[in-house]
């Protein structure tokens, strides 16, 4: 079972078609699909008394540690029926300060857009802010906005690392969008929730990783305080 530890404060993605800074942005689902086994920072949260902030780091261990070929094996042995994540999931216990709806958003692993679309019974769109390669080959920075009713309900900032040359070539030569890689390669990434909390405005914030052999995405998403009352 996952537990949460409380630590000191600190400051602080895949769907769409676009093109920025030379990197193809024909991506399709960001941040909310979001997996991995990396452990690191967390988001800041406001304590229940409202006058202090703290962060909650998710100290989770998968029920089973997947082998290097786990994704390929899973695809061969059993149909995934449209699942967005690979391997088995674990129960994630969140701090009691979050409501039921907030917990659904914070633990969404590849279903965030569907959840918000269903909640409002409206279409979600994605706008790419930037999609930039770093000077180090195989590293990329990406940021997108998720919108509904032309209102931004999530900003997803991603750090993406491709450590296989064939994957880098897909992006740099074949112009496959970063957000399309998992689907193009028929991979189900592993989701690992690292941190949850609240941003300075009181909205939700979370950090998680999505990981498959050769691809690691570390994603931070921030949400407005009025996430569930955009029409009010």
Image: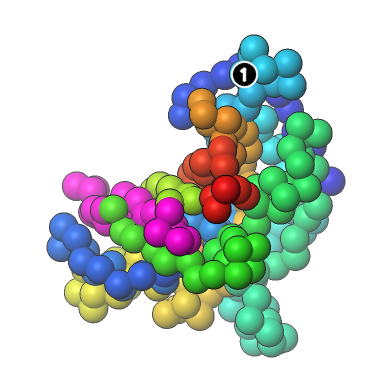
Please give the name of the residue rendered at 51% of the width and 21% of the height, measured from the top-left corner.
Answer: 10
Q: Is residue 23 visible?
A: yes
Q: Could you say where residue 81 lies in the image, as x and y percent from the top left? A: 68, 84
Q: Nearer the viewer, residue 92 or 129?
A: 129
Please give the name of the residue rendered at 50% of the width and 80% of the height, measured from the top-left corner.
Answer: 186
Magenta span of residues: 130-151
Q: Is residue 188 left or right of residue 165?
A: right
User: Which quarter of the figure has residue 17?
Assistant: bottom left
Is 97 magenta? The answer is: no
Please give the name of the residue rendered at 63% of the width and 38% of the height, measured from the top-left corner.
Answer: 196
Is 134 magenta? The answer is: yes
Q: Nearer the viewer, residue 229 or 82?
A: 229
Q: Is residue 212 left or right of residue 56?
A: left
Label 1 environment density (alpha carbons within 10 Å; few <14, some 14–19, many ≥20): some
Q: Could you say where residue 150 lies in the image, as x and y percent from the top left? A: 40, 59
Please give the name of the residue rendered at 74% of the width and 38% of the height, measured from the top-left corner.
Answer: 98
Q: Which residue extends farthest left? A: 22
Residue 46 lies, with reference to residue 157, above or below; the image says above
From the image, give the main secondary structure of the stretch colored magenta: strand
Q: Could you say where residue 83 lies in the image, as x and y percent from the top left? A: 65, 76
Q: Which residue extends farthest top? A: 51
What residue did someone put label 1 on? 53
Q: Secondary structure at mark 1?
A: strand
């Amino acid at each position: 079972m996952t537990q949460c530890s409380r630590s000191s404060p600190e400051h602080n993605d895949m769907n769409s078609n676009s093109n920025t800074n030379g990197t193809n942005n024909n991506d399709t689902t960001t941040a909310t699909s979001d997996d991995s086994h990396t452990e690191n920072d967390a988001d800041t949260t406001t304590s229940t008394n409202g006058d202090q902030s703290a962060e909650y780091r998710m100290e989770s261990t998968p029920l089973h540690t997947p082998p290097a070929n786990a994704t390929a094996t899973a695809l061969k042995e059993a149909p995934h029926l449209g699942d967005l994540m690979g391997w088995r999931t674990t129960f994630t216990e969140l701090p009691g300060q979050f409501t039921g709806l907030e917990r659904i958003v914070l633990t969404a692993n590849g279903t965030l857009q569907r959840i918000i679309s269903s909640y409002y019974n409206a279409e979600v769109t994605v706008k790419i802010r930037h999609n930039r390669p770093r000077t180090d080959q195989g590293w990329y920075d990406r940021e997108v906005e998720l919108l509904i009713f032309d209102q931004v309900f999530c900003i997803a900032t991603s750090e993406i690392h491709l450590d296989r040359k064939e994957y880098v070539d897909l992006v740099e030569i074949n112009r496959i969008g970063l957000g399309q890689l998992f689907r193009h390669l028929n991979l189900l990434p592993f989701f690992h929730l690292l941190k949850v909390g609240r941003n300075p405005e009181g909205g939700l914030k979370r950090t998680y990783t999505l990981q498959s052999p050769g691809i690691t995405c570390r994603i931070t998403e921030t949400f407005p305080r009025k996430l569930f009352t955009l029409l009010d």
